[in-house]
């Protein structure tokens, strides 16, 4: 079995735990599935991929937006500026 093949189950495990959300940089509010903005990350829309989050923001011409990639138990989230 190749190295990449051995890592596949690990990737699937972390992808299930990983959470990708969109946050407004100015207000720190999170985007919901109803295209509203809220303060609680738990109720934020969860995107299945970073590309899906990027497309969503670009198609709607959202500005001052960050994508957060969150893993349970991590000390910090990965924050990427999108628009």
Image (tube, rainbow, N blue to C red):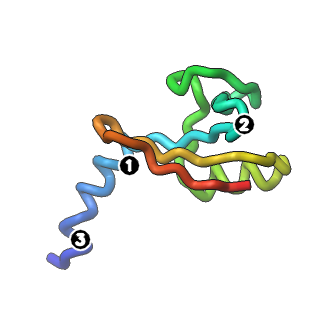
First in sequence: mark 2 vs mark 3: 3
Question: Which residue lies under the disc numbered 3?
Answer: 5
Image x and y of residue 24, in percent: 69, 38
Question: Which residue lies under the disc numbered 2?
Answer: 26
First in sequence: mark 1 vs mark 3: 3
Res 51 → quadrant: bottom right
Q: Tell me the tag on residue 15.
A: 1
**Label 1 crowd bin: few (<14), some (14–19), many (20+), radius 10 Å:** some
Q: State the CA–CA distance, disc 1 to disc 2.
A: 28 Å
Q: Tell me the tag on residue 81.
A: none
Image x and y of residue 66, in percent: 63, 47
- Give the quadrant of the C terminus: bottom right
Q: Provide the secondary structure element on which disc 2 rests.
A: loop
Image x and y of residue 18, in percent: 40, 43
Q: Provide the secondary structure element on which disc 3 rests.
A: helix
Q: State the CA–CA distance, disc 1 to disc 3.
A: 16 Å
Marks 1,2: beta carbons within 8 A? no
């Amino acid at each position: 079995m190749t190295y990449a093949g051995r890592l596949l189950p690990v990737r699937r495990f972390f992808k299930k735990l990983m959470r990708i959300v969109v946050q407004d940089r100015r207000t720190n509010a999170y985007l919901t599935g109803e295209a509203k903005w809220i303060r609680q990350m738990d109720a934020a829309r969860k995107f299945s991929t970073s590309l899906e989050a990027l497309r969503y923001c670009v198609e709607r011409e959202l500005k001052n937006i960050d994508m957060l990639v969150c893993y349970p138990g991590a000390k910090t989230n990965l924050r990427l500026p999108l628009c």
